[in-house]
Image (cartoon, coloured by chain):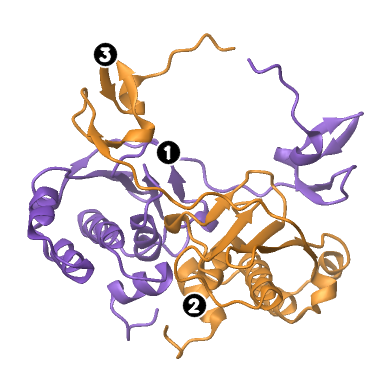
Chain colours: A purple, B orange
Amino acid sequence: MDRTRTPWERCVEFHGHECPGLAVGYRVAQIALKELGVERAQDEELVAIVENDACGVDAIQVLTGCTLGKGNLLYRDYGKQVYTIGNRKNREAIRIVVKSVGWRQELEKLGLDREGRIRFILELQEDDFCTVQKIPLEFPERARIYKSWTCAECGESVMEARLRVKDGQFVCIPCAGEYNRGW
Amino acid sequence: MDRTRTPWERCVEFHGHECPGLAVGYRVAQIALKELGVERAQDEELVAIVENDACGVDAIQVLTGCTLGKGNLLYRDYGKQVYTIGNRKNREAIRIVVKSVGWRQELEKLGLDREGRIRFILELQEDDFCTVQKIPLEFPERARIYKSWTCAECGESVMEARLRVKDGQFVCIPCAGEYNRGW
């Protein structure tokens, strides 16, 4: 791990720019690691379930090590500022809900520029920013590795669990095409 | 951007560990940037459509700047080593298919350790590693911002486009519950 950059700088580098949404995810991730008493996941030690795909999710990936490519980041398309983070080792999990009242209205009133809004979020008192609740979590299965097969139509390789069948042969989902009557 | 670390080191730091899958994504991302003649996306300048969620996707995020939190990384669950990367500015797009024959069998035969397998992938000739094809791409809409509402049941905030209705009131998807007869 490169110690010459701050955690915030690492989030900004990954996301590509600074923004208030990134600051929200930064706060959530830092609070999650502190509450669970853990470090960033090198492998699949932690699991994060994020209920939106807004900017803050990039800070979650950078700081918790729950990433799309490791399979320990699960996206639920609920449009909510809710984050559940769990530790596989001791099965502890917390649910963090970013508050939608109080600080947001105050921030609106202040009329700050982007830089000021980011600083405001980064410096908010934790109690004003979110609620944190310990919850029981059913941990998802770890990432699995499947055998690969060749699609009989396009000739490209496909993982077994995503094969379909066409004219009695293995094909990929795009080559299988859609068949439904709109039900 | 921190110039003290190599692109590979930045991928490893983000992913949390070195592995052959990460090396595959690293090669794909480097080839994509070269072929399109672009730099990493600071905002949504580039779009990546990845047809798997294996380790390599983390290298795609780090090197192309197409990330889950920016909404310019689209995941299609096809289980294929296929990556489409496009440049919004000039509408150019390429489709990279990682070859499943040749180098994979050679690698298997060599019986290298993890470190050796990674090096093998990083040093492969591009033509042996993948095919690259220019394609027309229908670019997805940019990320939108919606108004938020409060769920009448749990009291949590929800983006408008994900609201459901229950007893005549706005609710979130988890509070709305499921109603279907298994069709």
Q: Do the residues labelled 1 and 3 touch (CB within 8 Å)?
A: no
Q: Is mark 3 on a helix, strand or loop?
A: loop
Q: Picture coordinates of residue B129 (x, y %)?
A: 80, 70
Give amino acid for label 2: Arg
- Residue matched to label 3: B168
Mark 2 or 3: in front is: 3
Number of marks: 3
Asked if residue B9 lies left or right of residue A17, the reply is right
Residue A84 horizontal/vertical position (percent):
32, 44
> Which mark is in front, 1 or 3?
3
Give the Cα separation between the discs numbered 1 and 2.
29 Å
Q: Mark 2 lies on which chain?
A: B
Q: Position of residue B142 (x, y in %)?
A: 48, 53
Front residue (pair A119, B124): A119
Callout 3 amino acid = Gly
Left or right of residue A126: residue B53: right
In this picture, is A163 found above or below A8?
A: above
Q: Nearer the viewer, residue A141 or A27?
A: A27
The label shown at residue B10 is 2
Which residue carries the number 1 mark? Answer: A77
